[in-house]
Amino acid sequence: LRSNICDMLSAASRIVSCRGATVSRVRHSVKSRRFNSSIKKKTAPPRTSNDDNRISPWYPIVGGLVITVAGGIKYCHDLFGGMEGLERAAAFYSLAIPRYVQYRFHMVKESPDEVWDSLHTETSQDALNIMLQLKGFYIKSGQICASNLGNAFPDIWIDTLSVLQDQVPAKDFSVVKEIIESEYGKPLEEVFATFDEEVIGAASIGQVHRATLVDGTPVVVKVMYPEVEGLFRGDVRTIKLFAQLAQPVHVPALEEIEKQFMTEFDYFKESKQLAQVRENLMKAGMTGEDSSDGTKLCAIPKPYLDLCTKRVLVMEELKGDKLAVGLRKDVQGHAARAGQTPEEFLAERKALDEEAEAQGMSVQGPTAQEFEVYRSILNRQRQLENAGVLIYNTTFGWLPGKKKKQYKGKDTLPINQAKLVDDLIYVHGHEVLVDGYFNGDPHPGNILLLGVEEGNPRLGLIDYGQVKQLSKKTRLLLCKLIIALDDDNRDEIVSLMKQLGYKSRDMNEDNIYLYAKVGYDEDNHELTGGKHIQIFMEDLQSKDPIIELPRELLMVSRASTMLRGLAHYLHQSRSVAKIWRPIAEQVLKEEGDPIGTGKNSARKTPKATIEAQAA
């Protein structure tokens, strides 16, 4: 492309500097044709030397246009990352622009549900195909959608794109082997005693394999694809340009996300971040060298720093399923106990959701305590059934023609989804408020479900490529904001948001309050007035355009909305401020910083809910 541009510039230069015989011949030819076509013949006046040297006014114009076009091509070339980036941008825009227009049209028209369902189904499948084709940041965007960020995506989109959480296509093993040997400067066999060619997980920038170190230690190895960094930069710019035109309210967040994503392209740095977060949570007693005894809230893998490089990360393997897989198995168990297929069970749940929404309510699942009671009842039933199986197998099971029955394992017990959500939000609250060092990308693809077979489900947290660090000043102000949000203390919320750096055209206090509630605490119909979160944010922006957001807290808001998105999906909607409040109070107490907020007697009444029982 650069060569072609140079050729065009050179041609333009030659045109502009053209002199002498060539110009003379062209001008003479034109005048001859004009003379011959004239009715009244005239003798051409003699040419002078000035005629030969005079430049047509069209030549500089043509040259300027050529230079302008060439400059525009070069700008786009640099902006999107070369010809491949331009092709990727074109593929994205070919889907995004017409679909965006369609969605806006149906919003204005207020189309019925069946039209929306059809549009969601068609568009989400087209989007999935584009994401799988382009990979890179588009896979990451699909994972964000599948995690129901901000409770913004319809179930059809979530279901369609959920494959991106744990089923991203992987590259051939020969590519992986070449990268590893290039990073270590030695054959693969000299670094690992065994290396499984089968992929156990693939994501937007790399894939993971099982291996064994030369001393026999089992590990997993994450390998980065060679081309992803350049593609990611162009992809983020493409989506940012689209947002600037169609959804400007999201631009500040995209700029911060772009900044954070750039830290993902160094696995050695990620390994040190992983080690730091692990050490922080070990000090807090939330994880440990062995978290299988049920006394720890989560497990975080140990990285082997001496084997980590820019494109290879070696760490301890956590035995368990991706959260999406574990939840699918859990649905199958619930459906079997209800005498239904998983499809029938989910359809019934969807009907309950729609009925509640029509009444202006929401379905709220059982509490952690209710789940434990239910699990205890089912466990007693399991033990009694297993006692019967034991009697049968030791008596009739030995007879000819009889088959021994299978025992029911603890993995048949339902997952305490309420405790899972509470633990997940609490752990991240400690990372944010106590350590000021947290994972800004806690989507379900980065969460494992461990200990299910032992009947002790717990969290496994992986992928610390997007770690954000907060200053002490910001962290303490955020602690105060969390308490004010839980108190629903509007004046204190507005004051703290201003101190944290929120700026808008009119500094409308209602807008500031709503932005803080939705950004850091909770989102529900009561707050949004029943509007979709995208429309709600656009309305806030139109009433009082945001000039500057608290940049340090953009990733906190992103983490909070991701965690709430998972909670909404599991019918376990939460107020993040309520769960984080005890942590915030303890931090301020230890720092000797006054809390400065009190319980607001005018606190709003909680929204109406429908208690959905597990049985």
Image (tube, rainbow, N blue to C red):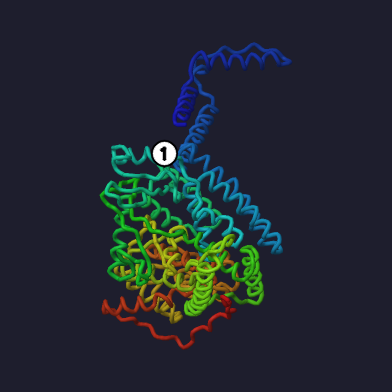
Write down the residue under mark 1: 175
Residue closest to the far right: 39
The residue lying at 55 percent from left, 42 percent from top is: 90
Taking 476 as reference, is 27 above or below it? above
Observer-nearest of 547 and 530: 530
Could you tell me residue 606's position as x and y percent? 53, 81
Left or right: residue 600 compared with residue 214: right
Left or right: residue 118 compared with residue 48: right
Could you tell me residue 399's position as x and y percent? 56, 63
- The quadrant in which residue 491 appears is bottom left
Count of marks placed on residues: 1
Evaluate whether residue 299 shows in this view.
yes
Taking 55 as reference, is 41 above or below it? above
Left or right: residue 160 compared with residue 315: right
Left or right: residue 506 compared with residue 307: right
Tell me which amino acid carries mark 1: Val
Which element type, helix, strand or loop, lies under badge 1?
A: helix
Taking 460 as reference, is 571 above or below it? below
Residue closest to the far bottom: 601
Observer-nearest of 59 and 107: 107
- The quadrant in which residue 557 appears is bottom left
Observer-nearest of 257 and 209: 209
Q: Quadrant of the C terminus?
A: bottom right
Could you tell me residue 385's position as x and y percent? 53, 73
The residue lying at 44 percent from left, 67 percent from top is: 560
The residue lying at 50 percent from left, 58 percent from top is: 144
Crowdedness near tag 1: few (<14), some (14–19) or many (≥20) residues, C-alpha within 10 Å: few
Evaluate whether residue 508 shows in this view.
no
Could you tell me residue 300's position as x and y percent? 35, 61
